[in-house]
Image (spheres, rainbow, N blue to C red):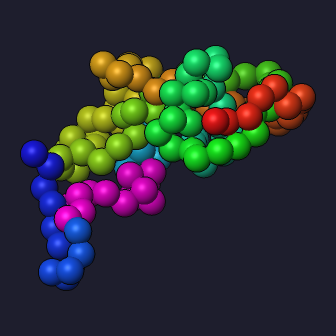
Amino acid sequence: MKPRYKLHEDQEDRYLIYATPAIEAIFELVRAYEFPGLTSRFQSFFGSPTMVDLRKFAGQYVQSGTIYEVQAQKYSLFDMALVAPGYTIGHTLANARQYWSGSHSPDPILECLIDLPVTVGNEVGRYP
């Protein structure tokens, strides 16, 4: 079970290491020191490799939106499911190493980190 805490009795439990900026900072440190040849998440445009992957992502993170095709010269494929709070800082570091090495979790959410510049093309759909 993940460590939880409460700031006040009337609040719901929260994960101890659940803070998107902190997780992103850990992932960026791992990338900078161990995978310096890869483009930072902070310098990337995000996309999905297929409509199936996009709908899987959207089903968990997006209520509605418009879907566009994009064109770019270079992208890398990673598993967004690994960008998640770990049980400990060590677990989060392990997730970051798996992510940047290109490993996939048992139930991956594939994302493309697309190097800029990106050309946004035609609208190809809407979600949901």
Is residue 73 on the magenta stretch? no
Question: Closer to the camera, 71 or 41?
Answer: 71
How many numbered tags mark residues here? 0
Residue 26 located left or right of residue 51: left
Q: Is the N terminus in the top left, top right, bottom left or bottom right quadrant? A: top left
**Percent from the top left, x then y, of residue 2?**
15, 49
Is residue 21 on the magenta stretch? yes
Point out the residue furthest to the left here. 1
Question: Residue at horizontal 26%, vertical 35%?
Answer: 94
Residue 105 located left or right of residue 58: left
Work out whether 4 lies above or below 26. Answer: below
Question: Residue at horizontal 77%, vertical 29%?
Answer: 125
Question: Residue at horizontal 34%, vertical 27%?
Answer: 98
Q: Does residue 70 appear in the picture of this structure?
A: no
**Percent from the top left, x then y, of residue 19?**
37, 60
State which region is magenta: 13-25
Question: Residue at horizontal 40%, vertical 40%?
Answer: 83
**Percent from the top left, x then y, of residue 48?**
63, 26
Q: Does residue 6 appear in the picture of this structure?
A: yes
Q: Is the C terminus in the top left, top right, bottom left or bottom right quadrant? A: top right
Residue 116 located left or right of residue 63: right
Name which quarter of the figure residue 54 lies in.
top right
**Percent from the top left, x then y, of residue 46?**
65, 36
Name which quarter of the figure residue 70 lies in.
top right
